[in-house]
């Protein structure tokens, strides 16, 4: 095997593993259950929002430079700090502790259902202790994940997926429980948090590629593109299989079943108690690899934000402690109040990824600012609306609601598309006239 292919596979497996974590195991069957016979459009929505865009965010960041700072620079340092602050909140309080909660509830408890209540604390201490040990060898994180943990995880997941098609537990025949399976899956995938992970984790992969001897940008991009293909194929096969498995279970489980309970139920129905052992190993490995990657991201961000006053090692330890406390409250509690945060951040993250990919065609920083500011406004409304839906807020805004509902594509959850396009155009026009005014002043004075 030549060096380029080997390195592409290692990095690609690492990208797969860091993206494929807690939510990636439990959400696809739920999306399938919601979709019923319309599971294929749901696969497309999940593949776009949950796989393609997150992977493209890494390529977009690499296209702009070596880190998130580079892709955020056209918007301004205020945006970088705002985004990083939100990310630092999400990592220790939502995404990383969720990996520990799912690893226990679906992985460990799925195999050993009669555990005493205190066992969750022991498990979480051991789990995040292992995360801390892996993270501390920062330079080897990608190799550890890509060479050792991911192949085992992928083999187990592929076995479950293959069995879902060979011995289906049912047939997806119902109309499901949602009106539009594509948009439902697209927006549901926000809960995975993978796009935010992609933007944040890109520096680790770019750094790893550089350490492997690839110094030219074209060589880095080649490895990154190859790795993206490897990760996409792996994620698509697993997501599609788990979603199909959920779609086949429409007559077996109620529509309001908990996501973790559904995953355990469909695998037990498919493979029996023996299959639960395989699922338990897969879940724990999937969650652990993501926990390692996210903790490394959070520690790296915190070290940079404090300008080295709090070291990477200390930061990772603090994150591990917070995660133990947060995860002990259970997965459902984390999922419930994480939705508003993701709804706020995802529109701007998607727009930032698109702009990073199209930097050559949209060179105006003012256009970037217009697009991002617009996406932040739309995201803030979506988060506000989600908090009302969860009962966190009881504020009534009928006029604002009617205005937002009149925006094209708002009825299918894509409120941000048209406003962001307009924001890009308005920003570019304003930037053009400001630049023209600034450049003409000195000439006129000289005359």
Image (tube, rainbow, N blue to C red):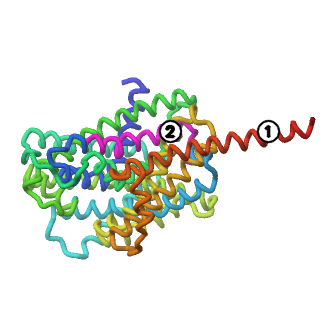
What's the magenta bit mostly, secondary-structure-wise?
Answer: helix
- Nearer to us in this view, 363 or 9: 363
The answer to which image quadrant residue 127 occupies is: bottom left
Q: Residue at x 43, y 26 (%)?
A: 3
Q: Which mark is residue 60?
A: 2
Give the answer, above or below, for where 219 lies relative to 368: above
Q: Residue at x 43, y 31 (%)?
A: 225
State the image coordinates of residue 202 (x, y, percent, origin top left).
49, 44
Which of labels 2 and 1 is toward the front? 1
Q: Secondary structure at mark 1?
A: helix
The residue under label 1 is 439
- Number of on-image labels: 2
Numbered range of the magenta stretch: 43-68
Q: Of the numbered discs in the image, which one, if any, rests on residue 160?
A: none
Q: Secondary structure at mark 2?
A: helix
Residue 26 appears in view: yes
Q: Residues within 10 Å of mark 2 (few under 14, many from 20)?
A: many
Instruction: Locate residue 327 relative to residue 242 in the image: left or right.
Output: right
């Amino acid at each position: 095997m030549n060096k380029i292919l080997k390195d592409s596979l290692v990095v690609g497996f690492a990208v797969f593993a860091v993206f494929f974590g807690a939510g990636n195991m439990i959400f696809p069957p739920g999306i399938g259950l919601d979709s019923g016979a319309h599971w294929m459009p749901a696969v497309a929505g999940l593949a776009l929002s949950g796989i393609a865009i997150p992977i493209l965010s890494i390529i977009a960041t690499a296209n702009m430079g070596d880190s998130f700072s580079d892709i955020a620079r056209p918007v301004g340092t205020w945006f970088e700090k705002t985004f990083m602050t939100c990310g630092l909140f999400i990592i220790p309080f939502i995404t990383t502790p969720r990996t520990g909660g799912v690893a226990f509830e679906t992985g460990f408890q799925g195999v050993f259902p009669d555990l005493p209540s205190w066992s969750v604390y022991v498990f979480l201490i051991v789990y995040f202790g292992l995360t801390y040990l892996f993270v501390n060898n920062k330079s080897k994180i990608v190799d550890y994940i890509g060479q050792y943990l991911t192949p085992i995880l992928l083999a187990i997941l592929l076995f479950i997926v293959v069995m879902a098609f060979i011995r289906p537990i049912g047939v997806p025949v119902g109309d499901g429980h949602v009106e539009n399976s594509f948009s439902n899956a697209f927006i549901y995938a926000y809960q995975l948090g993978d796009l935010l992970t992609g933007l944040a984790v890109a520096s680790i992969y770019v750094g790893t590629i550089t350490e492997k001897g690839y110094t030219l940008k074209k060589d880095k991009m080649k490895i990154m593109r190859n790795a993206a293909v490897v990760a996409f194929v792996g994620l698509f096969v697993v997501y599609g299989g788990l979603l199909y498995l959920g779609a086949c279970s429409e007559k077996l489980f109620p529509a309001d079943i908990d996501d973790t309970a559904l995953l355990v139920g469909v695998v037990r129905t498919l493979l029996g108690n023996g299959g639960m052992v395989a699922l338990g190993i897969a879940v724990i490995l999937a969650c652990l690899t993501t926990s390692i990657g996210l903790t490394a991201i959070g520690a790296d961000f915190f070290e940079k934000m404090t300008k080295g006053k709090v070291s990477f090692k200390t930061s990772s330890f603090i994150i591990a402690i917070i995660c133990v406390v947060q995860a002990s409250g259970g997965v459902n509690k984390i999922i419930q109040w994480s939705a508003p945060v993701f709804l706020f951040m995802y529109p701007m993250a998607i727009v930032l990824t698109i702009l990073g990919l199209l930097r050559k065609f949209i060179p105006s920083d003012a256009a970037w600012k217009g697009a991002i500011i617009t996406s932040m406004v739309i995201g803030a409304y979506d988060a506000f609306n989600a908090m009302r839906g969860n009962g966190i807020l009881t504020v009534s805004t009928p006029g604002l609601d009617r205005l937002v509902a009149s925006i094209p594509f708002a009825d299918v959850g894509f409120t941000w598309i048209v406003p962001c396009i307009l924001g890009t155009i308005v920003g570019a026009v304003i930037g053009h006239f400001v630049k023209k005014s600034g450049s003409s002043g000195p000439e006129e004075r000289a005359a």
